[in-house]
Image (tube, rainbow, N blue to C red):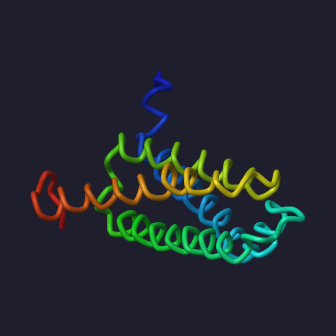
Amino acid sequence: HTSRVANMGRVEDVTLPARFITTAAHLIATLTIVYDSSETVKRALGSDLGDYSTELTNLEGLASTSIFFFCVEFLGMFTGVSLFMPSANLFYIFAHFFGALFTGLFVTLQWDLQAYPWLFTLFSFFPAFTESVIAFLVLRLNIMQFK
């Protein structure tokens, strides 16, 4: 009689697809900001469009930088540098799940524009920074065997 635990598979069978899906969902939510930034700023400012140009530049800059950070993360994921680190994968899954959720809420509920720098820092910068640190540790300091 085979036990249920033996049939469940490895942790990576769940975390790898979940990491990819949550990262892709967060990327799509961020792309929504990039392509709809003008309307997002107009909705957030309401009738007072005095700071429109400054706010638009800030939002587009952060969203575009976030796209770059996604490239860093996908590069690390697809090269396998951090792919088989369960604790890192769990961090990425949670960060991108909440990043996608809160970015979607930012757009749909017309949150104040000052909320996006926090979303950017917590859910784009920190995961990309973590990926960069892991890549450095793996590739330069050889903390894991990587070929």
Whether 9 is drawn above or below 63: the answer is above
- Quarter of the image for residue 5 reads top left
- Quarter of the image for residue 78 reads bottom left
Give residue 40's position: percent from left, percent from top: 78, 67
Number of residue marks: 0
Residue that extends furthest to the right in the rendered view of this protein: 47
Q: Residue at x 39, y 63 (%)?
A: 77
Q: Residue at x 36, y 46 (%)?
A: 88
Report the side of 134 relative to 19 (left or right). Answer: left
Question: Which image quadrant: the C terminus?
Answer: bottom left
Report the side of 51 relative to 114 (left or right). Answer: right
Return the residue nearer the eye: 91 or 47. Answer: 47
Whether 59 is drawn above or below 11: the answer is below
Give residue 141's position: percent from left, percent from top: 10, 58
Q: Residue at x 64, y 59 (%)?
A: 25
Return the residue nearer the eye: 49 or 128. Answer: 49
Give residue 91's position: percent from left, percent from top: 43, 43
Residue that extends furthest to the front in the rendered view of this protein: 50
Whether 75 is drawn above or below 119: the answer is below
Report the side of 109 relative to 126 (left or right). Answer: right
Whether 16 is drawn above or below 48: the answer is above
Give residue 90's position: percent from left, percent from top: 44, 42
